């Protein structure tokens, strides 16, 4: 996970603060409850991404025909990540270069 708890809390706080200032938004529950939900959601999505990346890296490690960090390897990585994300109902991209920095 690339964000620590403090950064995630800061994002949740800024988001709820921004929404609270918007006249079109009316909270039905305490902003703290909304912050906690945002925090849990961000954390869960980042953990899911970490799990998928690790799963794909493990699969690629067993593929002897593909050398790590080659264009072919990156293509397999991104395709396999997209497939795993689709299985979980997600539609966002995980780039090989960003993950392996």
Image (cartoon, rainbow, N blue to C red):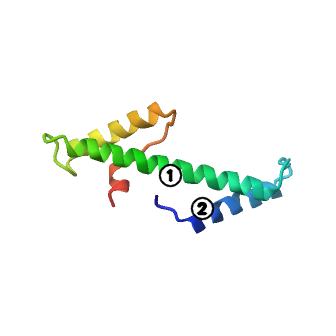
Q: CA distance from mark 1 to mark 2?
A: 10 Å
Secondary structure type for disc 2: helix
Residue 31: quarter of image: bottom right
Residue 86 location, x and y as percent? 45, 32
Residue 34 location, x and y as percent? 74, 53
- Asked if disc 1 and disc 2 are in contact, CB closer than 8 Å, the reply is yes
Along the horizontal axis of the image, is 5 left or right of 80?
Answer: right
Along the horizontal axis of the image, is 90 left or right of 13?
Answer: left
Front-most of residues 88 and 77: 88
In the rendered image of this protein, does residue 39 appear above or below residue 67?
A: below
For the point 33% across and 49% down, the residue is 96
Residue 63 location, x and y as percent? 18, 40
> Within 10 angstroms of label 2, few (less than 14), some, or many (20 or more) residues?
some
Q: Which residue is mark 2?
A: 8
Front-most of residues 36 and 17: 36
Earlier sequence position, callout 1 versus callout 2: 2
In the rendered image of this protein, does residue 68 appear above or below residue 72?
A: below
Secondary structure type for disc 1: helix
Q: Which residue is mark 1?
A: 46
């Amino acid at each position: 996970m690339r964000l620590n708890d403090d950064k995630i809390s800061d994002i949740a706080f800024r988001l709820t603060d921004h929404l609270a200032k918007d006249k079109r938004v009316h909270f039905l529950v305490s902003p703290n409850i909304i912050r906690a939900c945002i925090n849990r959601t961000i954390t869960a999505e980042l953990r899911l991404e970490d799990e998928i990346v690790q799963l794909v890296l493990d699969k690629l490690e067993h593929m002897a025909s593909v050398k790590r960090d080659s264009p072919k390897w990156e293509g397999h990585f991104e395709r396999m990540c997209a497939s795993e994300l689709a299985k979980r109902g997600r539609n966002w991209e995980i780039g090989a270069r960003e993950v392996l920095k």
